[in-house]
Amino acid sequence: MMLRAQMMLRSPCSRVATTCGRMRVTTVASSLVGDKPPVSASPVGMAGTLYVKGGVKAEYEVPRELTTAEVEALPALFADSAEKAIKAAGFDGVELHAGNGYLLQSFLAKKTNQRADKYGGSIANRSRLLLEVIDAVAARVGAGRTSVKLQPGITFSDLVEPEADVRELLDYLGPELSKRNLAYVCLSSLNGEPYFRLMQMPAPNVSFDVFRHFRSIFSGTLMINGGLGIETGEQYVSEGVADLVSYGGLFIANANMPALVAAGVKTGGLNPAGYDPRNWYSKDPAGDAKNYTDWPVQEPAAAAK
């Protein structure tokens, strides 16, 4: 969130959320700005293609490696964006996105971080930027308004980390994040259904329960996410593993999901179409809004049958 126009567009959204009595949290992540080339921890390209302006399909660019000085400047930039999100756009808090193969995760992962400076090598060095960004944002807007999303293992890119790397990352970040008293940590696991199949993998690449493992080493507020049904989410909360559960795929085709869940509707009563990747993205720019707002809303009584 760097431009005034972006802040003005998001401000009405935050006001609507306030009217509905919801906490408003925006995600602060790096993205391509204008025609500038992408940047990363190291010049490691991503396989595959994406759709660019005009619906044209193009291969991913090999990112430019940030210099040490550029990396050192990033925490202040994230803090600036967080401050704008809260003070100008009216959000209650910010969630730093350290998943999806985005910039912060490119420093965390061995595959994409091949640096030889203080930001590369050991797990402490690879985590340095994330922790510096968290500290800078928390100092600017308050730790109680700052959260972070982790997504080790499988991401929505070609970044797939082996189990040993996932465990090492969680074991290091759990105690470090516990010290910081953040609003919450969102741990997203794409290692279960249906995500590992989307990566054309025969089985999940992580055999242990990342949620239970992280809970054992993290003392703060924990939100979990990724391939969870209503019943599994409720179980994790009732057992004290998670404090909060967030949903993405199920929400796509169930816009009134909170009302459905409050009425006792279980996973089987929800529209499962949100988990179908064919419904996620449009190849035609003219149809980009399809499957975002056009799903029929189920009444709780009908869904519970």
Image (cartoon, rainbow, N blue to C red):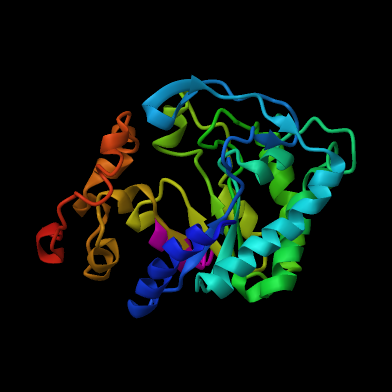
The magenta segment is 233-244
Q: Position of residue 41 (x, y in %)?
A: 75, 36
Q: Position of residue 103 (x, y in %)?
A: 66, 42
* Residue 43 seen from this side: yes
Is 247 left or right of 71, judged from the image as shown? left
At a point 33% along the width and 76% down the height, the residue shown is 20
- In the picture, residue 67 is in which quadrant? top right
Is residue 139 placed above or below 212 in the rendered structure?
A: below
Identify which residue, 169 or 280, lies in the foreground. Answer: 280
Q: Position of residue 91 (x, y in %)?
A: 50, 71
At a point 60% along the width and 38% down the height, the residue shown is 101
* Residue 239 seen from this side: no
Q: Position of residue 100 (x, y in %)?
A: 55, 41
Is residue 161 covered in magenta? Answer: no
Label count reads 0
Is residue 9 placed above or below 91 in the rendered structure?
A: above
Identify which residue, 282 or 216, lies in the foreground. Answer: 282
Is residue 234 covered in magenta? Answer: yes
Identify which residue, 94 or 273, lies in the foreground. Answer: 94
Is 184 left or right of 18, judged from the image as shown? right
At a point 76% along the width and 64% down the height, the residue shown is 135
Outermost residue to the right = 117
Is 231 left or right of 103, judged from the image as shown? left
- Screen quadrant of the N terminus: bottom right
Identify which residue, 245 or 103, lies in the foreground. Answer: 103
- Screen quadrant of the C terminus: bottom left
At a point 50% along the width and 66% down the height, the residue shown is 25
